Amino acid sequence: MKKSRFSPETYIQGILNGDRMLLSRAITLVESTLEEDQTLAGQVMEGILPFSGNSIRIGITGVPGVGKSTFIEKFGGLIVESNHKLAVLAVDPSSQQSHGSILGDKTRMESLASDKRAYIRPSPAGKALGGLSAKTREAMLLCEAAGFDVILIETVGVGQSETAVRGMVDFFLLLMLAGAGDELQGIKKGIIEMCDALVINKADGSNLEAAKLAMRDYANALHLFQAKESGWTPKVMTCSGLEGRGLAKIWNVVEEYRNVMQLNGFWQQNRQSQRIQWFDDHIRYLLESKFYQNPGVKLRLSEVLPGVQSGNLSPIKQAEELVQGFLNRAK
Ligand code: GDP
């Protein structure tokens, strides 16, 4: 075992005791692609799983520049002031290209980052989206076991990561700008359908009237969408992350959502189907990584790739043979 690793029990006990250093180390372990780390991470996850689940999980999305970090800084402040322990996680597929990460910048969320009641975890960079969201889910469960009872998962509103995050949260919040136009903001109809609250941000100064107008437009437009399975009508609101206005109302809506959904059973039902989705995702993830890590597959892939690329070999036939070869070796 490497020097920088602990026993599964050390991680588990540390996390259950709310030790942030061990929590961070466990998340790093979960994010590691090394096989020995994966085994250890699996043992830690098994140990903490019975102590997870007791939080409100909130997804927050919006295009870069909509004001997410400013919003989370203030909204997070309000949450911890209401006697909650808050963890902020990020999913950022764009960091694959830029090697940056949306929470990586130290200047973001400064006051929240130094607040003992909050825990901020930057996005792991350079991973495939499937792996990335799996890691985020595990990081969320680790945070819950460490006693954080509100989890904010931030994602950039560019499309791919929203569906993955929707599949692991209870409440999904979309931040928008007035007057930017849906297309300009890269907001697809699908994302609007996913959200439980649509909030026009930067409702301040000369932008206030435009924000109110946009709010009315969206409230009208939302009537055109099909009713949600939960029976919840998405709330349309305005706020100013910068001035901190409208944030208490948003938190009230989140709490109202939880109360109503826990009563009508949708909260539990949603968590159940998310568990199935997690199970399903994990099977897919395991199959894929075992397949691509298999030495025989690696060798054969390197042999046929040039032919597939040039068009001399059929992608369908080669894929079938590769998978069949893998299955035969596994017998
Ligand atoms: P992110 O990329 O979505 O995380 O956005 P940031 O929080 O970094 O904000 C982008 C820019 O918008 C910054 O210059 C902020 O100062 C500004 N901004 C953020 N929130 C507000 C707000 O509520 N009102 C106004 N007027 N500006 C804001």
Image: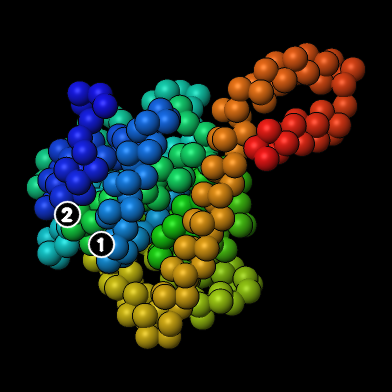
Position of 80 compared to 58: left or right? left
Q: CA distance from mark 2 to mark 1?
A: 8 Å
Res 194 seen here: yes
What is the x, y in percent for residue 56? 31, 65
| Residue labelled with disc 2 | 16
Q: How many other residues sit within 10 Å of disc 1, few (<14), some (14-19) or many (≥20)? A: some
Query: With respect to residue 85, does 324 lie above or below?
Result: above
Res 120 seen here: no
Image quadrant occupied by the N terminus: top left
Q: How many other residues sit within 10 Å of disc 2, few (<14), some (14-19) or many (≥20)? A: many
Please name the residue shown 59% across and 42% down the image: 287
Q: Nearer the viewer, residue 34 or 253?
A: 34
User: What type is the residue that disc 1 sits on?
Assistant: Phe
Q: Nearer the viewer, residue 241 or 90?
A: 90
Position of 228 compared to 242: left or right? right
Q: Are marks 2 and 1 in contact (CB under 8 Å)?
A: yes
User: What type is the residue that disc 2 sits on?
Assistant: Leu
What is the x, y in percent for residue 221? 59, 68
| Res 51 label | 1
Q: Nearer the viewer, residue 241 or 142?
A: 142
